[in-house]
Amino acid sequence: MEKSSASPHRVTQLLADWSHGDNAALAELTPLVYEELRRLAHYQMTGQRPNHTLQTTALVNEAYLRLADQTNPNWQSRAHFFAVGARAMRQILVSYARSNRAQKRGGGAGRIKLDEAAILSPQQSDEIVDVHEALERLATLDFF
């Protein structure tokens, strides 16, 4: 998308029009805010690891989809729009990181019911009962 030379007032007016249900305003707004969203995405990506698989353009596109998908947005100003955009980008990065961490921790592994996996020896059973009883006694104490 090309860089915009629109005034901040025009962007604010388009945001207000969009907030009032004018979808044509969203279409006109898109090229006007793209470069600033891209700059925000680049800033968000600077703190990420060097071999991050999510690229700046993908982050901008995902954030823009979240912004554009809002029903009856209530944009207070241009700054409000970009603040919400930056927050959406952070949320995308956090979700992405959580997803990667879950995959590292066996996120795709099948679940096994505890009773199926817990084949206990008599000694383990005694230890479990001892721990349970100790926790029960601890729960009766008043620490405050």
Image (cartoon, rainbow, N blue to C red):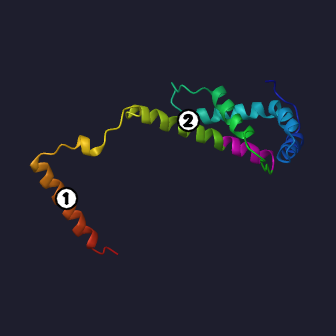
Report the residue at 87% width, 38% height from top: 25
Q: Nearer the viewer, residue 102 or 47?
A: 102
* Image-quadrant location for residue 2: top right
Q: Which mark is residue 47?
A: 2
Q: Quadrant of the C terminus?
A: bottom left
Q: Residues within 10 Å of mark 1 (few under 14, many from 20)?
A: few
N-terminal label among 1 and 2: 2
Secondary structure beneath dot 2 equals: loop
Percent across and percent down for residue 120 are 16, 45
Q: Nearer the viewer, residue 124 or 14?
A: 124
Percent across and percent down for residue 60 are 68, 31
- Please name the amino acid that badge 2 sits on: Gly
Q: Is residue 105 magenta?
A: no
Q: Find disc 1 in the rendering and name its residue.
A: 131
Percent across and percent down for residue 129 are 17, 58
* Image-quadrant location for residue 56: top right
Dominant secondary structure, magenta: helix
**Highlighted range, magenta:** 77-86
For this view, does 73 lie left or right of residue 124? right
Residues at marks 1 and 2, CA–CA distance in whole angstroms:
44 Å
Report the residue at 38% width, 35% height from top: 105
